[in-house]
Amino acid sequence: MPTASELICREYTKMVKSKYPEYSASWPIVSGYNLMNGPYGNYIVCIFKHTGNNAMMASSIVKFNKANTGVSSIASSNIDSVRDKICASFHLETMDSVVILAMDGSNLNSELQKLIEIHEFVMGVKKMKIFLSHKGADKPMVRKYKQTLEMLGFDVWLDEDAMPAGTALHRGILQGFKDSCAAIFFITPNYKDEGFLETEVNYAITEKMQKGERFAVVTLVFRDDDGKTGEVPELLKTYVWKQPHDDLEAVQEIIKALPVKLGDVRYR
């Protein structure tokens, strides 16, 4: 019977080679690792330290406790926060991996799915997309936010860039939402809940229902030079919305609301 780490490696290798065969020689875990693992309650924690060398592998047992996991016991509800704590406790790098497997293996598929989604961004085959919803008259303002978010490493969906000539509008917009982890609504006095803007609100709510905590609906309300404030569409009033005082505060609100966190600061 395979060990937890052997099972994880075997099934994950199948997944990666099926989805990204051209990257398998350099993909985390698949391309080689050193293993640190140990039990904690009803779970087995496996840390795969990336080496990129399949010829040699070292293995060691780790004693997990509240100090290095952040919790007295692991449960399905806190696995992701435990993973973050372990990454910090063991000073793991972006190519390293943490899998927290239930003793009965019942969460294997969900853990592998999380793993491949993380590695897709690490390997650069995908970027976190953010959908920017706005009225055409506000495009100059929205372009500034697009540039800032791109500098932070996000792939920003803006209609003028994301939909080449000939793209069916509804289809292009829908795909933009499906590819994104968040939708940011720029509510100015120009924003009216009608036409394609109404469609975008509906698509955002649908994505939120399907993806849950993995999708954020971010609503920012702005005032124009005459002091008039944008009106939040009824369907968006069910979500928290913010009225930033300036662009810097608006970017801060966006970053806080996103379902992802930015990477560790390091030299280029």
Image (cartoon, rainbow, N blue to C red):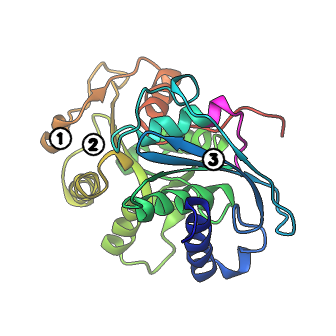
Q: Which residue is mark 3?
A: 37
Give the structural element (helix, strand or loop) at label 3. Answer: strand
Q: Main secondary structure of the magenta part?
A: loop
Earlier sequence position, callout 2 versus callout 1: 2
Mark 2 and mark 1: span between their CA atoms?
9 Å
Give the structural element (helix, strand or loop) at label 1. Answer: loop
Label 2: how many Cα within 10 Å (few below 14, some 14–19, many 20+):
many
> Circles 2 and 1: CB distance less than 8 Å?
yes
Residue 63, image x and y in percent? 61, 34
Q: What count of labels does the image hold?
A: 3
Residue 175, image x and y in percent? 39, 69
Left or right of 22 on screen, residue 194 = left
Q: Nearer the viewer, mark 2 or mark 1?
A: 1
Q: Which residue is mark 1?
A: 233
**Is residue 21 placed above or below 265 in the rendered structure?**
below
Residue 236, image x and y in percent? 20, 40
**Is residue 155 placed above or below 16 in the rendered structure?**
above
Left or right of 78 on screen, residue 206 = left
Residue under the point 33% across and 24% down: 223
Does residue 134 appear in the picture of this structure? no
Mark 2 and mark 3: span between their CA atoms?
53 Å
The span shown in magenta is: 87-95
Amino acid type, label 1: Pro
Residue 141, image x and y in percent? 49, 38
Q: Which residue is mark 2?
A: 191
Residue 190 is a magenta residue:
no
